[in-house]
Image: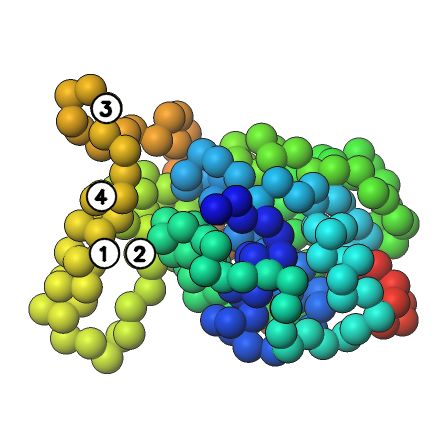
């Protein structure tokens, strides 16, 4: 089944719960970005634009425009996500889901995909230029995610955080099960070995700068408008 941005929005809300529309937009953006980095394919075909307050998927904006908070997404179906895609979205919700919409907006303002797409347009000015999938893929492949590198996550079954209260043996069992499950899903080449995910491992991962942040960001943020203003 083909997945679109509505399905991803529904999956995010199902995992994190009701949230402000801008926060939802950014979690959908990071789901697309990390899906490209980890699996070398888009999670959905919808265009993401470099709006004033960060990346925005216009098809989602057309649905939630006028709402500050979103609780359900009837236009989407989380069940349309493949097992691997659902794991990427789950990781994104674990890594970024505790941040506010303002924090996520500020975070994207410091990252090249949004910055370069705007070509120097001031933060408080509108823009509708598209953020290219290749820009997302190449940038996030240089980062670590959930404290692990791209290659580690792919070969490890896209598993990130586990409950810190779990015993070491239980954590090991969980990792082993997810690795086995993920590898069973992957297509085999003629020799019967797992597909190597294209060029996903060709870039050096920066383990010193994971995208997860624990404290509220202090960067000055763009001016906010009304509930109907672009996110």
Q: How many marks?
A: 4
The residue singled out by tag 1 in the image is 178
How far apart are the two marked residues, 3 and 2, measured between alpha carbons? 24 Å
Residue 54: x, y in percent? 73, 53
Local crowd at mark 2 within 10 Å, few (<14), some, or many (≥20)? many
Residue at the far front: name it.
1
Above or below residue 191? Residue 171 is below
Residue 69 % position (x, y): 72, 76
As drawn, the label of residue 210 is none
Name which of mark 1 and mark 3 comes first in the sequence.
1
Q: Which residue is drawn at 49% across and 39% down?
A: 36
Query: Residue 15, image x and y in percent?
Result: 48, 71
User: Residue at 45% of width from left, 34% of height from top?
Assistant: 40
Residue drawn at 51 percent across, 72 percent down: 14
Between 201 and 208, the one nearer to me in the picture = 201
Spatial CA span between label 1 and label 3: 21 Å
Residue position for label 3: 189
Q: Is residue 82 visible?
A: yes
Q: Would you say residue 147 is visible in this rendering?
A: no
Q: Is there CB contact under 8 Å for labels 2 and 1? A: yes
Can you tell which of label 2 and label 1 is closer to the viewer? Answer: 1
Label 2 sits on residue? 159
Q: Is mark 1 on a helix, strand or loop?
A: helix
Q: Which of marks 1 and 3 is in front?
A: 3
73 relative to 144 in the view: left or right: right
Task: Single out the mark in the foreground, 3 or 2.
Answer: 3
């Amino acid at each position: 089944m083909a997945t679109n941005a509505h399905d991803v929005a529904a999956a995010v809300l199902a995992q994190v719960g009701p949230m402000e529309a801008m926060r939802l937009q950014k979690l959908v953006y990071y789901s697309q970005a990390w899906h490209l980095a980890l699996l070398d394919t888009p999670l959905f075909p919808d265009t993401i634009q470099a709006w004033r307050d960060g990346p925005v998927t216009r098809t989602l904006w057309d649905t939630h425009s006028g709402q500050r908070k979103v609780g359900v997404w009837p236009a989407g179906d989380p069940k349309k996500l493949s097992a691997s895609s659902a794991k990427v979205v789950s990781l994104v919700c674990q890594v970024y889901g505790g941040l506010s919409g303002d924090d996520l907006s500020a975070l994207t303002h410091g990252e090249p995909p949004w910055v370069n797409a705007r070509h120097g347009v001031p933060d408080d000015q509108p823009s509708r230029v598209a953020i290219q999938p290749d820009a997302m893929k190449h940038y996030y492949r240089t980062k670590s995610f959930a404290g692990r590198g791209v290659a580690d996550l792919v070969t490890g079954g896209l598993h990130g955080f586990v409950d810190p209260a779990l015993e070491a043996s239980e954590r090991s069992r969980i990792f082993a099960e997810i690795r086995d499950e993920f590898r069973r899903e992957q297509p085999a080449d003629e020799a019967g070995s797992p597909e190597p995910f294209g060029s996903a491992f060709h870039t050096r991962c920066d383990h010193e700068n994971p995208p997860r942040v624990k404290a509220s960001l202090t960067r000055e943020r763009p001016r906010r408008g009304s509930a109907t203003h672009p996110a």
